[in-house]
Image: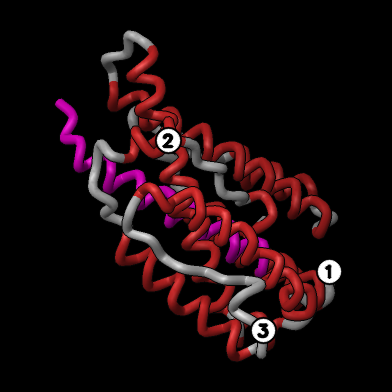
Amino acid sequence: MINYFKPIKLNLENIEYLKNLTPYWSKSLNNSIKRLSKWLSKFGKSSIDFRLEFYEDYEYYPKMFKMIDNFKNFLNQKYKIIKQNIKLLKKFYKFINDYCKILGICKSIEIICNFYKVINEEDFSDFKSLIIDLTNETISNYLTLYKNQLEVLFNDFDYLEMIFKNKIIFKNKIIEVNDIVGKITKFSLLSVKKNKINEQIYTKVIAETTEFYTFTETFKNNILTFFNKLRFN
């Protein structure tokens, strides 16, 4: 899933939109970047090739987003091995988790920019519905990608179809993925215990699920904070 979470290439228009609010995500983003940077030294990699730095000033956000995207090349070098073994996946959970959190924040920033673009270019007054629609469209797209990834790993397409079809979408509410993720986790554990899938497939399912859930929850929570700060009537 990580390869689908590519950060946007921010432009000057995006930067102007972001100036409408203070970067409330800074602390979380900075902390995750610091932790990821430490992994470079742990793996004996040069910080020059995969340099990752936090910038407070919006003017440097395009540079920071580019660094974040480039860091994926370092992660993928290690991840191919990590995803083969459940013990390794658990050992490097924080490594994967922090990167997915960062990507989730980047995606929320992209959607916030899209929100401001719409209200600036169109006669749009229902701001509440707009931000919810933009958010749900994003989550729905990633749910489809997540489902596609799982279909490659599982043979039981009917059960997967049932899980994803039963997702509940409430009007004026952001989509929740907890129930789907919980059922997939239980289903994969049961499948490996009954030898319907091997441990390598199980590890890949858990990896895909971890990436999807961490990214989506971070994205959603960051949007909810933005939503609450706007104080819609």
Tag 3–tag 1 contact (CB < 8 Å): no
Helix, strand or loop at mark 2: helix
Dominant secondary structure (helix, strand or loop) of the stretch shown in magenta: helix
Q: Which residue is drawn at 55% across and 43% down?
A: 8
What kind of residue is marked 2? Answer: Asn
Q: Earlier in the sequence, mark 1 or mark 2?
A: 2
Q: Give the range drawn in magenta.
A: 207-233
Q: Distance between the residues labelled 3 and 1?
A: 39 Å
Dot 1 alpha-carbon crowd within 10 angstroms: few under 14, some 14 to 19, many 20 or more: some
| Residue position for label 1 | 196
| Real-space CA distance between mark 3 and mark 2, rounded to the nearest whole angstrom | 33 Å
Residue 177 seen from this side: no
Q: Where is mark 3, residue-wise?
A: 45
Q: Residue at x 60, y 87 (%)?
A: 91
Quarter of the image where the C terminus is located:
top left
Secondary structure of residue under mark 1? loop
N-terminal of the pair, mark 3 or mark 2, is: 2
Q: What residue type is labelled 3?
A: Lys
Q: Residue at x 49, y 48 (%)?
A: 62
Camera-side residue: 68 or 213? 68
Q: How crowded is mark 3: few (under 14 residues within 10 Å), some or many (20 or more)?
A: few
Residue 70 appears in the picture as rendered = yes
Q: Name the residue under label 2.
A: 14
x and y percentages locating residue 4 in the rendered image: 66, 49
